[in-house]
Amino acid sequence: MLSLIEKAETGHELNREELLCLLSDASNLQEITAAADRVRHEYVGDEVHLRGLIEFSNICKNNCCYCGLRRDNTEIHRYRLDEDTIFKLAEYAVTQMGLKTIVLQSGEDMWFNSQRMCALIGRIKTLDAALTLSVGEKSAEEYLAYKQAGCDRFLLRIETTDKILYKRHDPGMSWKRRRECLNDIRRSGMEVGSGCLVGLPGQTLESLADDILFFKQINADMVGIGPFIPHPDTPLRNAEKGNFDLSLKVMALTRLLLPDINIPATTAMETLASNGQTKALQSGANVIMPNVTLNECRKYYELYPGKSVTNCSSDKSLAKLRAKISSIGRSVATDKGFRKRQNNLQIETLSVIMPSNKN
Ligand code: 5AD
Ligand code: SF4
């Protein structure tokens, strides 16, 4: 009998009970992250993709209880960058820093309607880079318009698959609607990114197992997982923060079940633990999203306090990041870093040829 970890490493399938069994035993962390590191090496290689993140507006119409950008937070200074500024940041990131993907992220800021967003997409796509948007819930038509304007990928975390928890922490929003958005993004032809928070108050290990199975079910192309970090100007100010090791484990298990996807070493991981991002890169992650936002705006994009920024907008910080990556035997990718889908048939065939791989 293969152990559950071996089973996940070779077959990339686990059921809910098996995931739960692995999640509830803290002593297996090292074994799981090492397996995820091997699977990462085998399927997506040793290259780390750098995605230049531009946080272009911190205005949000939503009121998520965990997030510092929530609409009821009056303590925060709100900003919105204009199209020229955003374009110049993107241009610098691509032409001067050599980044191959730009990620535009904002709160749900209604000023950026479909027309404005598409104009911005079209302009950025004149640069030789892939483009990812992370701007929240939109209509199917709008997602399609983004794709037609040239957008390649879209990030929309499900946050949690636990509908009761979602209702509690995302007042005024609907889990069903969010799920539909992910379908609409898929139908638009963009790559689909999702993800979850680990350590939301009231979250169970069962629901984390469901989150991992959810990513598999929607066949996400990218999954970002980060620990919850309480923000003092939100209703969850007194809640306990998420656990780093558990977040790392959820990420590693996601790599085991979705071997060929892109997984970022999230900023929240770096914020919660020293060297958190390096540990994540050694536990299944293969992407880093250095921040290329205007310096004067960064401090206002405070999803959570102490947000550790992987800086990249000076030659020196980029060199430092490169050095960090090579110090763990990895290199910076030179391509645009789309998901390199593995042929499912091949995996099927392998398990037929080697029946011992089946538990
Ligand atoms: N702690 C950690 N992550 C957070 N996010 C929002 N607020 C917090 C917090 N307090 C994450 C959400 C969102 C992403 C942009 O930031 O998962 O999808
Ligand atoms: Fe807005 Fe996103 Fe923050 Fe929710 S998590 S309040 S949608 S920025």
Image (spheres, rainbow, N blue to C red):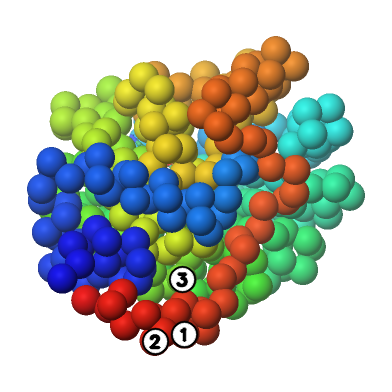
Image-based side of 310 in relation to 165, left or right: right
Instruction: Report the side of 198 relative to 123 (left or right).
Output: left
Ligand 1 occupies quarter: top left
Q: Are marks 2 and 1 in contact (CB under 8 Å)?
A: yes
* Residue depicted at 71% across the width and 66% down the height: 147
176 vs 307, left or right, is: left
**Marks 1 and 3, the one that precedes in the sequence:** 3
Describe the element under mark 2 as helix, strand or loop. Answer: helix
Residue at 45 percent across and 22 percent down: it is: 308
Kind of residue at badge 1: Thr
User: For disc 3, does the CB lie below 8 Å from ligand 1?
Assistant: no
Give the quadrant of residue 94.
Answer: top right
Name the residue that disc number 2 marks: 352
Q: Looking at the picture, which amino acid does disc 2 mark?
A: Val
Mark 1 touches mark 3? (CB < 8 Å): no
Of the numbered discs in the image, which one, if any, rests on residue 349? Answer: 1
**How far apart are the two marked residues, 2 and 3, measured between alpha carbons?**
22 Å
Question: Is residue 82 placed above or below 19 in the rendered structure?
Answer: above
User: Which is more toward the observer, 165 or 312?
Assistant: 312
Between 51 and 7, the one nearer to me in the picture = 7
- Front disc: 2 or 3: 2
Disc 3 designates what residue?
A: 219
Say what secondary structure mark 3 lies in. loop
Binning the other alpha carbons within 10 Å of mark 1 as few (below 14), some (14 to 19) or many (20 upward) gives few
Position in image of residue 12 (x %, y %): 36, 68
Instruction: Please say whether residue 274 is visible from this viewpoint.
Output: yes
Number of numbered discs overlaid on the protein picture: 3
Q: Nearer the viewer, residue 68 or 5?
A: 5
Sort mark 2 into few (<14), some (14-19) or many (20+) by Cα contacts within 10 Å. few
Residue 54 appears at what percent x and percent y? 65, 35
The amino acid on which the numbered mark 3 sits, given as a three-letter code, is Asn
